[in-house]
Image (spheres, rainbow, N blue to C red):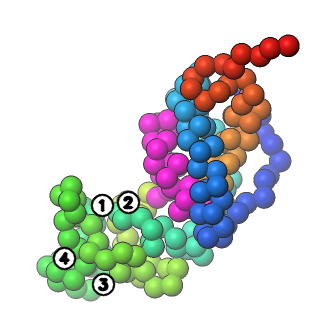
Amino acid sequence: MGRRKRKMKLESDPKTVKRLAEEREDENWRFRSFLKGSDLEIEELDAIVHRHYEDVASRIDCCACGNCCREVTPILSEHDILRMATGLGIGTSEFVQRFVVKDDDGDIVFRDSPCPLQSGNLCTVYDHRPDDCRSFPHLHKEDFVFRLVQAVQNCLVCPIVFNVFEGLKDELWHQCEDDWNGDGHENMRFL
């Protein structure tokens, strides 16, 4: 484990990424189970994820994609609202009235989807964007093993997440998947 491989070809088209992620959904859930049951230390897995993320993110331009703005609903804080309102040159009351609602969970979110502040693939308030948007796709964070459901779901949306997940499967799983059946137990091999 942890061996470096040559750079893989990256898939950056959001439509192709979604199609491939849908085709590999069962495989991705099995890989999630593999990671949950693996003996990798949390810090070791984080280091591997961070390495893949840095490589992939350096080769895919988020601003050329913008798919997260079409597909993901960020949770907004009061600070986010103030920052975006300032960026638009309007008051927070006007911003709230025009752009936000509380969802069924009581979270403050954008009223409309896709994001009403997106123009083409670009964010019109990029320098003032919400913290959730700044942090997306969350692969730089620690404790990746506790966000695996989110990662599998984000494979459908984000070319970076999709390619990182594929790289992780190549490095950590494909080399030993014959020995593991996806439910935490080794396969019995009969000669």
Q: Sequence order check: which comes first, mark 4 or mark 3?
A: 3
Q: Amino acid at mark 3?
A: Leu
Q: Sequence order check: which comes first, mark 4 or mark 1?
A: 1
Q: Sequence order check: which comes first, mark 3 or mark 2?
A: 3
Q: Position of residue 9 (x, y in %)?
A: 78, 58
105 or 145, which is in the foreground?
Answer: 105
Asked if 189 appears above or below 85 in the picture, the reply is: above
Residue furthest toward the top? 191
**Going 73% across and 60% down the picture, which residue do you hit?**
10
* Real-space Cα separation, disc 3 to disc 2, in angstroms: 18 Å
For residue 186, the mark is none
Q: Sequence order check: which comes first, mark 1 or mark 2?
A: 1
Q: Amino acid at mark 2?
A: Asp
Cβ atoms at labels 3 and 2 below 8 Å apart: no
Q: Amino acid at mark 4?
A: Val
Q: Amino acid at mark 1?
A: Ile
Cβ atoms at labels 1 and 2 below 8 Å apart: yes
Residue 173 image-quadrant placement: top right
Image side of residue 106 versus residue 25, left or right = left
* Real-space Cα separation, disc 1 to disc 2, in angstroms: 7 Å
* Real-space Cα separation, disc 1 to disc 3, in angstroms: 19 Å
Q: Which residue is mark 4?
A: 96
Q: Sequence order check: which comes first, mark 2 or mark 4?
A: 4
- Nearer the observer: mark 1 or 3; the answer is 1
Image side of residue 67 versus residue 24, left or right = left
Task: Estimate how packed mark 4 is, as few (under 14), some (14 to 19) or many (20 or more) residues with alpha carbons within 10 Å.
Answer: some
Image side of residue 74 versus residue 52, left or right = left
**Going 52% across and 71% down the picture, which residue do you hit?**
67
